[in-house]
Image (spheres, helix red, strand yellow):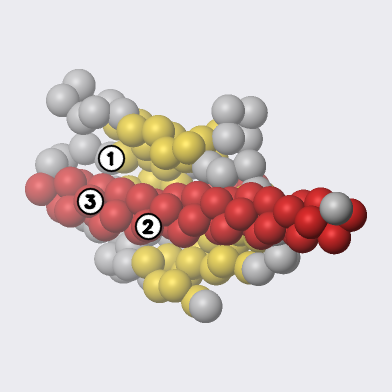
Amino acid sequence: MFIVGVVSLFALQHIRDYRARQAERLFFEQFEASWHATREYVAVEPHNVHLSWDQTNHTLHYTSADPQYQSMDIPIPETLMCVDPETWFRIQFNHDSAARPRSLICRSKIDGHRYEYRVQMMWGMLHVKK
């Protein structure tokens, strides 16, 4: 009976870790897709879009002064932490496509894996460092 209990606890922990990793993977897929969609939006529309990491609500928040732009929130899994919050604060997508170069870094609380994105200056391209 003891062995069955230990094996069950071990299996439950792996299921929780698996779900948390899947949530992280889904977050990064949403982040990359929204980043590219925002770049395309500002290339067509003459408005800027701002991206911020909202630490209190644990979300990424896209906003714009354009009344037709739909603000967007992407929930961040609790297992991810922002390594340098200042780099994630008020990222601006400009109509002329220029973006300040920076590295956006997250770390997983599950296994310490580091996710790094590098933003290219002129076109705001997002490069994933794995």
| Quarter-of-image position of residue 18 | bottom right
Residue 93 drawn above or below residue 66: below
Q: Can residue 82 be seen in this view?
A: no
User: Could you say where residue 107 lies in the image, as x and y percent from the top left?
Assistant: 66, 60
Is 66 situated left or right of 55 in this image?
left
- Which quadrant holds residue 104? bottom right
Is tag 2's residue or tag 3's residue first in the polypeptide sequence? 2
Element at label 1 = loop
Marks 3 and 1: which is nearer the front?
A: 3
Sequence-first tag of 3 and 1: 3
Local packing at callout 2 (Cα closer than 10 Å; few below 14, some 14-19, many 20+) is: few
Q: Mark 2 points at which residue?
A: 29
Residue lying at the far left in this picture: please name it: 44
**Mark 3 falls on what kind of element?**
helix
Side of 56 where 119 appears, left or right: left
> CB under 8 Å between callouts 3 and 1?
no
The amino acid beneath tag 1 is Asn
Query: What's the residue at 10%, 48% (across, down)?
Result: 44
- Depth order, front residue of 94/83: 83
Q: Residue 37 carries which label?
A: 3
In the image, is 55 to the left or to the right of 123? Answer: right
Which tag is nearer the camera, tag 2 or tag 3? 2
Label 3, label 1: how far apart the Cα atoms are = 13 Å
- Camera-side residue of 25 and 121: 25
Please tell me how crowded label 3 is: few (under 14), some (14-19), or many (20+) other residues with Cα within 10 Å.
few
**Rendering coords of residue 49 (x, y %):** 31, 39
Question: Where residue 95 sits: x, y (%)?
Answer: 21, 48
Q: Which residue is drawn at 28% across and 40% down?
A: 48
**Total numbered labels:** 3
